[in-house]
Image (cartoon, grey):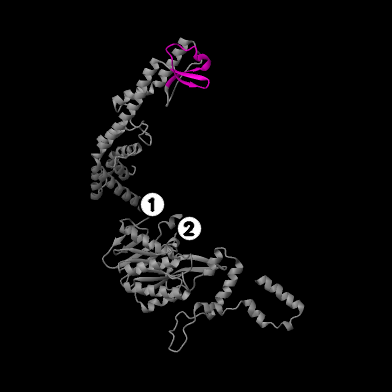
Amino acid sequence: IGDLERILARIGLRNARPRDLARLRDALAALPELQMAMATLDSPHLASLANTVSTYPELAELLARAINDNPPAVIRDGGVLKTGYDAELDELQSLSENAGQYLMDLETREKARTGLANLKVGYNRVHGYFIELPSKQAESAPADYIRRQTLKGAERFITPELKEFEDKALSAKSRALAREKMLYEELLERLISHLGPLQDSAAALAELDVLSNLGERALNLDLNRPRFVDEPCMRIEQGRHPVVEQVLTTPFVANDLSLDDDRRMLIITGPNMGGKSTYMRQTALIVLLAHIGSFVPAASCELSLVDRIFTRIGSSDDLAGGRSTFMVEMSETANILHNATERSLVLMDEVGRGTSTFDGLSLAWAAAEQLAKLRAYTLFATHYFELTVLPESQPIVANVHLNATEHNERIVFLHHVLPGPASQSYGLAVAQLAGVPNDVILRAREHLARLETTSLPHELPPAQPGQAAAPMQSDMFASLPHPLLEELQKINPDDLTPRKALELLYTWKTRF
């Protein structure tokens, strides 16, 4: 069954093409079998849909009788209606189509009558039908040959008999085309008179199509029925991402989610590629599928009604509109903070990473506090470990993390959600997996070691009156000399022999 709603819209506008009617014909032919299948289902709603779909035996028979099995794309050149649909059209088409045989017979007769072996009978759109003779034989043409056109090396003639046939054949072709177009328009008018019921049937078929698809997916993808409750909650056991699990070659790691009136927000930490975004998106997909009436990819799901799903995920820009990546991120965040309610689901993934560390951390912290105040169901993924102290001041906030482990200096992602904050982000390990050069990784580890010993504590005490403000992020990096410079400062050149100095240069060269 094709896209009936679009086909019927074209019919209503009287610009439906022949292949649209062919698809409608095939769809109507399938309806009786569909009705038989629906009759065995014990469901009042499906019975109502089956009744609305109905069958249209008269229209089905009309289109089967009228439209060729494989009609052309347009009506312009004819060939759309079947032989036997209209007697007058068949007669005109027969006259036009038999012209070829008549011309072959005429050529044979004229060759025999005139004795001119090179005589040919032909047709073109400009001059119509003609008898052609080479220039040398044109003088031998019979007296009833009337000159029609002179070519280089040939002459073309017409005879009274050929002229009479031409008038009849050419008019038959144009009249057949006009007749076919008129019959096609009459066919459209008959369909338009049934347009209302047909559109209702198309809408019911569309709903059946969706329900059938959801049923098939529920069976083949191991989906289960969600349960809506009045109490505010969102409890998912062994939830899965319905797309990701289909493309994985390894088993998908399912995870639980539990939110209720006393626990509205999860601060999600863990390594890059650890599964934070997948965990958040699968939650949104499960909620969305539940609200459209589908079964969901989870062992069980119990939730209250959600009014909207808000997302701040990924990075994109609007350079043509003059908006940077960070501006787009903040616009999305602003929309969420202005419109989220206690019945909304909010996904916040890495807010604040498009600006300096302290600016981004401050914005992410304040946004999380505001969402906690709004009491929206929120999944807040971040690499700002400072945010993991939020549960101390916000009882409705809880920490969870996706775990990973290191084995032989390699990171192994376990993709399992556990309570509490993560211990680290494993950013350097992920960079190594991505193929960042090893000397860059080694240098990054040296920077990291210095940053961890010289950077500010996670909770910054407010500056007291008369005290200088906390140092900015740039000061942290400015205080980190290159390791080579540190070593040079410890060396007294006067104590080095030329040989030791040369060995030291070779050592530094291998290290840097």
Residue furthest right as drawn = 498
276 vs 59, nearest the viewer: 59
Name the kind of residue labelled 1 in the image: Asn
**132 drawn magenta:** yes
Start-end of magenta stretch: 129-157
Residue furthest bottom as drawn = 466
Quadrant of the rendered image containing residue 40? top left
Relative height, residue 412 to residue 116 (above, below): below
User: 462 left or right of 502?
Assistant: left
**288 drawn magenta:** no
Relative height, residue 447 to residue 306 (above, below): below
Residue 327 place in picture, x, y as percent = 42, 67
The first of marks 2 and 1 along the sequence is: 1
Q: Name the residue under label 2.
A: 250
- The N terminus sits in image quarter: top left
Q: Name the residue under label 1.
A: 220
User: 427 left or right of 35?
Assistant: right
Q: Which residue is drawn at 54% across and 66% down?
A: 431
Q: Is mark 2 on a helix, strand or loop?
A: loop
The answer to whether residue 61 is visible is no
Residue 494 place in picture, x, y as percent = 74, 83
Q: Residue at x 37, y 60 (%)?
A: 285
